[in-house]
Amino acid sequence: MLNFELTEEQKTVVETVRAFAARELAPQIAELDREKHYDPMTFVKFRELGLTGISVPEEYGGAGMDYLTLGLVCEELEYVDTSFRTILSIHLGLCGSGIYQWGTEAQKRRFLTPLARGEKLGAFGLTEPGAGSDVAGITTRAKRSGSDYLLSGQKMWISGAQQAGTFLIFAYTEPEKKHDGISAFIVDRGEAGQAFSTFTIHDKAGIWAGNVGGINLDDVRVPRENLLGEEGEGFKIAMGCLDNGRYTVAAGATGLIRACLDASVQYAKERLAFGKPIAEFQLVQDMIAQMVASYDAARLLYLKAGWLKNQGIRSSRESSLAKWFATTSADTAANHAVEIFGAYGYSDEYPVARFLRNAKGPVIYEGTRQVHKLIQAQYALGLRKDKPLRCPLPSYRPRVPVS
């Protein structure tokens, strides 16, 4: 039976996060964006609201809610600004979900619980200066040193690099095996010492209120018990993390479409040209209509992916499709919003210029639109098929009310 109605709990979460974002985030975003400043208090506020572990079971310090709720929260955060959603995407969608899906019980207790409680920020170290979509092109190495590993290399375009305390780092343990020679490691900044350092990348084209940087690894000693999964499972782990990350990116981009739509509708009703509101001009209506269609379609796509995750069903195809469609549509919606606003849209007097700058990044990261087009074509042609994972994403377990 199809049911598009949110649960009462989900409705409450949406209302709570929407009010929180309007009260705590919206008033400061213009200044943060203009100053290109990441405010660490944002994560603290997320923690106080219970967002840092929204979809993590209560036994690991989370709120125990489902994956759909995580998507709904991401939509509300990006409605205000992409930088706010990015925090949750990296912290929980990529880093936290990887440990939850592939970690041992000891690893979950040690690393996932502090992430869920908001005691530490998580980050995801896969991309390198010469390796983005080509994961097999990474050059970071992990060599055995007694019972430990020594990690050496550099990671780039890492969201939260300067603030994070827990990192998922991907490195070759057996380079000759290509994809099957990559392994995943949990690296704690406090334990890594001076061999581990981070830096900020300045002068990005957009998402100015978010921190993005790099990681330098100079024989960072990582204990054997910090290996996530088995040796050689790093590529599978990375792709599983990206499934969840893409889902949150899609949900967030849906929020950006809605932000463009709401701003455009309000402005079109107020702005006069040739003696009447520009809302009466058909070509303005055409752009607004496209936003309406894009928003509804993007929302349905990410909700479907979230529903599959709740059932414990692999959603690689659906998450890819949702991410591709939503981010591309958000980019188009932002372009239309700027054109509806005209000269004012090209200034920072209104938020649509910021929307346009922010929309481009998600089209590129976590798989470019070209990569996702190929993925969808390969699924349709039968050239790509998902194999069962040794550690599938755990299905949602509804919380048992305390009587």
Image (cartoon, helix red, strand yellow):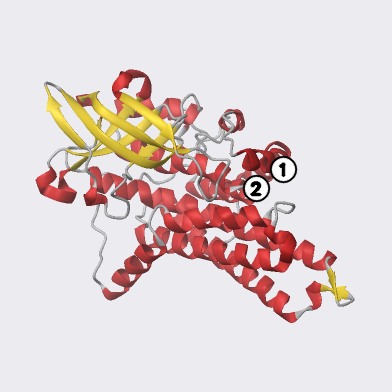
Q: Residues within 10 Å of mark 2 (few under 14, many from 20)?
A: many
As displayed, is residue 125 above or below residue 224?
A: below
Image position of 319 (left or right of 392): right
Residue 373 at what x, y percent from top left? 37, 68
Residue 190 at what x, y percent from top left? 37, 19
What distance separates the C-alpha of mark 2 from that of mark 1? 8 Å
Image position of 27 (left or right of 322): right
| Residue 5 shows in the view | no
Image position of 114 (left or right of 238): right
As displayed, is residue 113 above or below residue 262?
A: above
Which of the two labelled residues, at mark 2 and mark 1, occupies the earlier sequence position? 1
Q: Quadrant of residue 26?
A: top right
The residue tagged 1 is 22
Residue farthest toward the right in the current orientation of the protein: 275
| Residue 345 shows in the view | yes
Q: Nearer the viewer, residue 55 or 24?
A: 24
Q: Quadrant of residue 224?
A: top left
Disc 1 residue type (three-letter): Ala
The residue depicted at 32 percent of the width and 73 percent of the height is 380
The residue tagged 2 is 80
The residue depicted at 17 percent of the width and 42 percent of the height is 232
As displayed, is residue 129 above or below residue 61?
A: below
